[in-house]
Image (cartoon, rainbow, N blue to C red):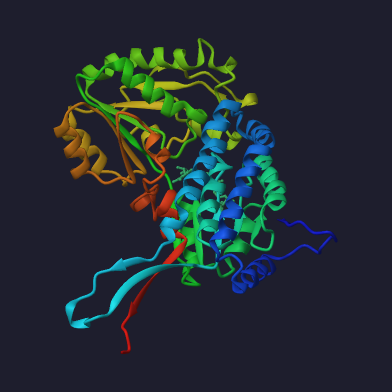
Amino acid sequence: MVSTVSTTPAPAETPADVVARLRATFRTGRTRPLAWRTEQLRRLRRMLTEEGAELIAALHADLGKSEAEARRTEIDFTVREIDHTLDHLDQWLAPRPAPVPAFLGDATAWTVLDPLGVVLVIAPWNYPAQLLLAPVVGALASGNCVVAKPSELAPATSAALARLLPRHLDTDAVAVVEGGVPETTALLEQRFDHILYTGNATVGRVVMTAAARHLTPVTLELGGKSPAFVDAGTDPAVVAARLAAGKFLNAGQTCVAPDYVLTDPGTARALEAALADAVRGLYGPDPAASPEYGRIVNERHFDRLTALLGSGRTVVGGEHDRATRYIAPTVLAEVPADAPVMREEIFGPILPIVEVAGVDEAIAFINGREKPLALYAFTDSAEVRRRLTAETSSGGLGFGLPVAHLTVPDLPFGGVGESGMGRYHGHWSIETFSHRKAVLGKPLG
Ligand code: NAD
C-alpha cells in the first residue's frame, strides 16, 4: 500500500509506478539544493515534535514501549540526528580539496558529493520509527528521493508512519510502502540507487541478491551475538546496573544489546547477585507490573525465547506469560558455551553468563564466532582495552557502557562480516547516500 497525499483518489500505484514517479522528481533536480534538503529535515522534525503522541501510542501498541523509552530511543533520538545534520550539512557538503602530484603542474583536484537518486530504506520492528527515520534523514540530507518500507511486524507504527510522513514531507520525493514479504519482494525487483536494510542476516542475503541484479549498492545493518566481557576486580554493582539497563531496554529486543556475558567464575558469582539487584532497581519486585518494561513483539518470538530459558541456572527471572507476551528480565548463570541460548542471537530479555578463565580465553571465544555488531568490555585495565581493540573485530566497541556508542552522532554505526556492511549516522550517512565524485581541473592558459 502506497501513501501519498492527493486531492483526487488515485488508483493504487505499483512499486514500479512509485519508483518511476520518484525518479522523475529526482531528474528535475528539485532534491539537490541545500534549501530543499533542510526544508525536508525541518518538516520531519516538526512531524516528530507535533505528532509524537501518535507515534508513542503506536509504539506502545506494538511493543508495550513506555512513553519515556519511546521518546528517548525513537523520537528524541531521531530529532537529535536531524539537529546534528542541520547544524553541519553545509560543511559536510563542501567540496574537499585533494593534493595533486607535481607532474600535473598547476592542476587542482577536489571531491564533490552527488546525490545517488532513489533510495530504498527497509526497517525492522524493534525500533520501528528510529530505524526507518534515521536512514531517511541521511538519504534526504544527501539530496535523494526515498521509498520507506516500515516493518509489518510493528503494524501500528507502520500505519502511523504511512499516515504521517506524506502529510509532512514532499510526496513527489518520499513514498511509504507498507507490507510484508510479497510487497518487499516486489519492491526489490525495482532498480534503486542504494538500499539500506536493517534486520536479520537471512533477509540481508535476499536483499543483497536482489540488489546485485541492478548493481545497486547496499548497506546491511544486521545483528548477531554481542558479547560483554567483565574483567576481574570490577565493581559488580556498577557493571550490573549498566549491563541490565542495556540488556533489558525494549525487553532485550535491541540489536546492540549485550547478548551474553563472558567472565571468570569468581566475578560471575558477584555479578549474579548484583544483576538480580539491578533488575529490581530498574523494574521493582514484579517487572510485569512496571510501566517501564516492554513486551515481546509477537507469539513466534515469545515461543522462540521461552525455549531458550532452560539453559544454565536461573539467577533472576524466568517467569513468562504468553497471553501478554511477557518474559521477565532473566539472568542465567553457568551456561555452557554450546547451550541453545548460545547458538543464536537472543534478541530478548535473557542474559546468559558464560565462564572463561580470563581475557585470553574471552578473546579466543569471541574470535571463534561470527564478528558481532558490538563488543562490550568492563575493565579498568588499559592493557585489556588495548588487546580487545587490537585482537578482536566487531561493528562497534564499548568500554564500560553498552549501547551508548550509537548515540554519539559522528561515530559510524554499522556491522562487519555477519553483522553487516556499511555504516550511517551523522556525516557517515552523507557518505553512504552520496557518491563522492573525483574532480580534476587544469587551467587552459
Ligand atoms: P523484520 O522481521 O521486521 O524484518 C526486517 C525487514 O525485512 C522488514 O521490513 C520486513 O518486511 C523485511 N523482510 C522480511 N522478510 C523478507 C523477505 N523474505 N524479503 C524481503 N524483505 C523481507 O525484522 P528482523 O529481521 O526480525 O529484525 C531483527 C534482526 O535485525 C536482529 O538480527 C537484529 O539484531 C537486527 N537489527 C539490526 C539493527 C542494526 O541497526 N544493525 C537494528 C535492529 C535490528
Q: Is residue 30 visible?
A: yes
Count how many numbered circles sit on residues in the image: 0
Vertical placement of residue 382 versus 83, above or below: above
Q: Quadrant of residue 354?
A: top left
Quarter the C terminus occupies: bottom left
Residue at the limit of the structure toward the left, as seen here? 383
Vertical placement of residue 254 versus 133, above or below: above
In the picture provided, is 342 more to the left or to the right than 299? left
Q: Is residue 350 visible?
A: no
Q: Residue sitting at 85 percent across and 61 percent down? A: 8
Q: Position of residue 100 (x, y in %)?
A: 23, 74
Quarter the N terminus occupies: bottom right
Front residue of 362 and 416: 416
Front residue of 105 and 282: 105
In the picture provided, is 63 more to the left or to the right than 388? right
Q: Position of residue 327 (x, y in %)?
A: 53, 24
